[in-house]
Amino acid sequence: MDAQLKKGLLEVCVLAVLKKESSYGYKIIGDLSPYVEISESTLYPILKRLENKSCVTTFTQEYNGRLRKYYCITEEGKRRISDFMEEWAELTRVYDFIVKEETQG
């Protein structure tokens, strides 16, 4: 899969997890693992990019005597998911065209 496409897909996957509830890195990985393989070294740069794009905000909360960083989706993040859904519909039309041409050619 094209690296840029995969990067965009992973960003939207992370946002989809955060749309359900605010979460922290390890839990995000666990929530995504049934659907897509993602490591900590991949996730944290994605979270930083999403934060820089104002798609997520962060807050810290104490857990077992340590501070844990949580990520929370913003309205911009929700718009990104919506934009992705529109883009996906367009990609589906292109895919259908390609498949049709392959089967007829």
Image: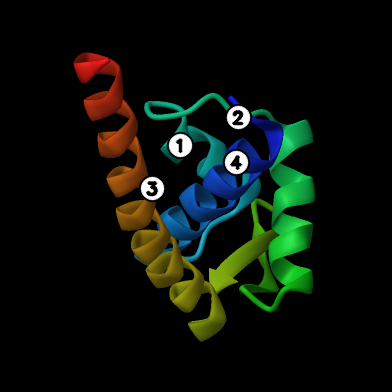
Describe the element under mark 4 as helix, strand or loop: helix
Q: Position of residue 74 (x, y in %)?
A: 54, 80
Q: Amino acid at mark 3?
A: Leu
Distance from disc 1 to disc 4, alpha carbons, whole Å, reads 17 Å
Q: Which is more foreground, mark 1 or mark 4?
A: 4
Please give the residue where the numbered disc 2 appears in the rendered image. Answer: 38
The crowd level at tag 2 (other Cα within 10 Å; few <14, some 14-19, many 20+) is some
Q: Amino acid at mark 1?
A: Leu
Please give the residue where the numbered disc 1 appears in the rendered image. Answer: 32
The crowd level at tag 4 (other Cα within 10 Å; few <14, some 14-19, many 20+) is few
Residue drawn at (73%, 69%) of the image:
51
Residue 64 visible to an observer of this rendering: yes
Please give the residue where the numbered disc 4 appears in the rendered image. Answer: 5
Which comes sooner in the sequence, label 3 or label 4?
4
| Numbered disc total | 4
Q: Is residue 36 left or right of residue 103?
A: right
* In the depicted structure, whether residue 4 falls above or below residue 90: above
Which comes sooner in the sequence, label 1 or label 4?
4
Distance from disc 2 to disc 3, alpha carbons, whole Å, reads 23 Å
Q: Is residue 61 left or right of residue 93?
A: right
The crowd level at tag 1 (other Cα within 10 Å; few <14, some 14-19, many 20+) is some
Q: Position of residue 6 (x, y in %)?
A: 60, 37
Distance from disc 1 to disc 3, alpha carbons, whole Å, reads 23 Å
Distance from disc 2 to disc 4, alpha carbons, whole Å, reads 15 Å
Residue drawn at (60%, 49%) of the image:
8
Please give the residue where the numbered disc 3 appears in the rendered image. Answer: 91
Q: Are marks 2 and 1 in contact (CB under 8 Å)?
A: yes
